[in-house]
Image: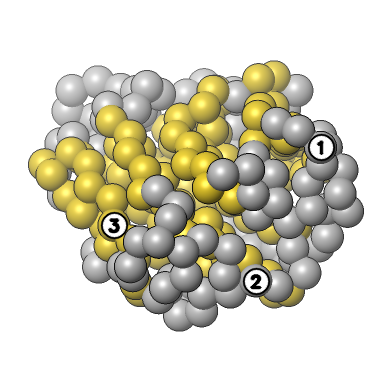
Amino acid sequence: MALVWTATEGTGFVDAGWVSPYTFSAVGIGTASADRYVIVCIFSRDRNVASVTIGGSAATLIAQERGGTSRDISMWGRLVTSGTTADVVITATSSTFNDIGIVVGHLTGANTTPTSTTTNSYGYDPDPHAVTLTVPSGGIMLVALGAEDNAAALTWSQGTEDYELHGTGTTLNSGYLDGVSGSQEVSITGCDYNGCGVVAAAFEPAAAGNNLAWKLASSRPSLAGVGGLAG
């Protein structure tokens, strides 16, 4: 099976309304399969994320970058073998959420333990924001950026940008890099405010000689504004 990414849904922004836990109901997670590993990328502007459940069971934290207590970009995963939708429930470390958004997708044919992960920290880092990982042969690198900034017209140095979701002073951006191996850098330009953070993870095929497939199932930003497919 060739490595594939398919973007299937983009959803406009709504207001989270200062609650925790916050539930994204009936999120599309794609076609059921015995090896479907659902991944949720989350950006929260006002609170840190403490835990996530997908379909009623705890998800595993893959990578997370926090900017104090007010900015948080993270990636979570869970094997979900049945159904085409699932509730995604996100709990804050303290208090309640206001601005929070998600992008959801799934891997098939993958070793669900990432071979490596990395982050680009929040802080006074100049544009661009870059992450570097070693991509295994036949594998993939997943990348997500969260910004306390309505950072329009983001540009990737390589790879494919899928979702660029904008709210009022908030951006969630995601994509992937495949078809290459070895040390690879993805550099994202256009987010020149200090409130930009990036997380990334590399995955390998479940067995030698097999390529994995990645499909974007859904995006659900809960911010006031608009969002959709990049490009």
The front one of 169 and 12 is: 169
125 w.r.t. 230: above or below: above
**Amino acid type at image mark 3:** Ala
Q: Residue at x 74, y 63 (%)?
A: 223
Residue at mark 2: 169
Q: Secondary structure at mark 3?
A: strand
Q: Quadrant of residue 55?
A: top right
Q: Quadrant of residue 127?
A: bottom left
Q: Name, please, the residue furthest toward the left.
A: 182
The earlier-in-sequence mark between 2 and 1 is: 1
Mark 2 crowdedness (10 Å alpha carbons): few <14, some 14-19, many ≥20: some
**Seen in the image, is 10 located left or right of residue 177?**
right
Q: Residue at x 65, y 29 (%)?
A: 50
Point out which mark residue 95 bears.
1
Q: Residue at x 25, y 68 (%)?
A: 157
Give the distance between the C-alpha atoms of the residues marked 1 and 3, in whole angstroms.
31 Å
Mark 1 crowdedness (10 Å alpha carbons): few <14, some 14-19, many ≥20: few
Give the distance between the C-alpha atoms of the residues marked 2 and 3, in whole angstroms.
21 Å
The front one of 201 and 7 is: 201
Residue at mark 3: 130
**Marks 2 and 1 close (CB-CB < 8 Å):** no
